[in-house]
Amino acid sequence: MSLREALPKVATALPGPNAKAIFEKRAKVMPAAIKSIYPLVIRRGEGAMFEDVDGNIFLDWVGGVGVMNIGYGNPELIEAVKGQSERYFHAMMNIVTHEGYLDLAEALNRIAPVRGDEKNTMLVNSGAEADENAVKIARAFTKRPNIVVFSGSFHGRTMLTMTMTAKKSYAVGMGPFPDGVCRAEFPNVYRRPKGMSEADAVGYYVDRLRETFIDASPAQQVAAIVFEPVQGEGGFVPAPLEWVRAVRKICDDSGILMIADEVQTGFARSGRMFASEYYKEAGCAPDIITMAKSIAGGLPLSALTARKEIFDATPGGTIGGTYCGNALSCASALKVIEIMLRDDYPGKALSIAERCAKRFGAWVGMFDCIGDVRGTGAMMGIEFVKTKAGKEPFAEIVNAIVEEAWTRGLVLESAGTYGNVIRFLCPLCVTDAQLDAGLDIFERSIEACVARAK
């Protein structure tokens, strides 16, 4: 059986002997501040699986934190990158134009659900770089200084995106921070005020956003409102559609741009190529979409798409960069889009989500420590609490479950403001047998950790 069809199998202690030697090297040659809690060293990967240097086989439900939607080692991507590598590796668009950039921009202009008929796309290198450029472009277009971001948000680790990010453990000792970033409360319906109905929660959070224009910045000084359709580091919290409609109206009434950070939700994860397709269908499409992660199957690339009018307001020379739209990454991204549309990866995400939702939903009744299951498409989160009534975050059991699962061959990752959410970001090419094996390992890991916690 090929690795692509294999099931999890762990035959050594973790880390194994070969991995231990590599971790000793890691400790010597790279900064300890680049953290890793996993005792895993990859040797090769195919589909949703990878093998470590000691021969153990793991099912990956993290996928490079949403990078591997199309899976490890897709043969068509390999051939596309090989073909481009035989022509040239790099051409900087400020010096020599290469058609791969233009073809990819054309493809993204066609599928990105932003407002406007005539669109432009800019290619950059990382999610943070895409988000930072989106803010620069919004400021240039509106001639306004401020932006509004949200509690629970994560937008990157550059100086501006670190400021935009809510969780300040990502910014310890890094200040002072840039001005002009205002924060509102994100609509986390599960953690709405006690006694408030779900129906009333959306209005409550819209009112909290409006208060930002009183407490932090007048609306007339706000260039953009930036949010993730499903918060990643914040705990896989989806933005309610009615709230997005209200945000769109606030933006329209006040001349503010709406920016959807689809770095993690993009490329079929949500059950659409972009989660903002749900917004477009409801008449509330964003003005700018940023994207990265799975865009190029693991090669460094990101992008932002907006209507041409917005880009045209940007002064010449203020955007761009040496590696933006690297030729190898563009070749891979074009093939990713082709495969995902041809093989209906959004449909795969919905099918996976349906299977997972049944099991995850059953666990809510089985385990007192599971307070909520939520998500959009196959971007799902399970929130662990000490009591269902009190909703006290239970990060300790999440850490234990993550560790227990990897000893059984399943790679999980935590998330959430309080570290009490386990996220699901499995590659969308996972087989049914692999998905079922992962669900079984996850359930047994919860059982084992609950038993030990008593």
Image (spheres, helix red, strand yellow):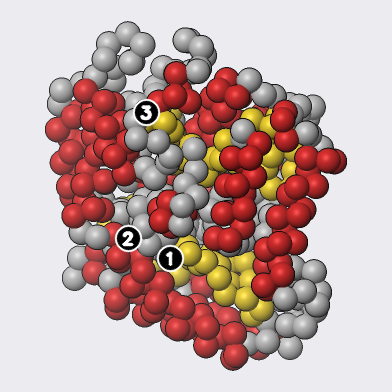
**Quadrant of the image for the N terminus?**
bottom left
- 140 left or right of 50? right
Residue at image position (85%, 41%) is 215
Residue furthest to the bottom: 366
Q: Nearer the viewer, residue 236 or 170?
A: 236
Residue 441 appears in the figure: no
Residue type of the residue flagged with mark 3: Asn
Q: Which residue is mark 2?
A: 346
Residue at image position (27%, 32%) is 106
**Quadrant of the image for the C terminus?**
bottom right
Q: Which residue is mark 1?
A: 377
Residue type of the residue flagged with mark 1: Gly
Q: Which mark is residue 120?
A: 3
Q: Where is residue 98 shown, x and y percent of the image?
A: 24, 19
Number of callouts: 3
- Which of the two discs, 1 and 2, labels the residue nearer the N terminus? 2
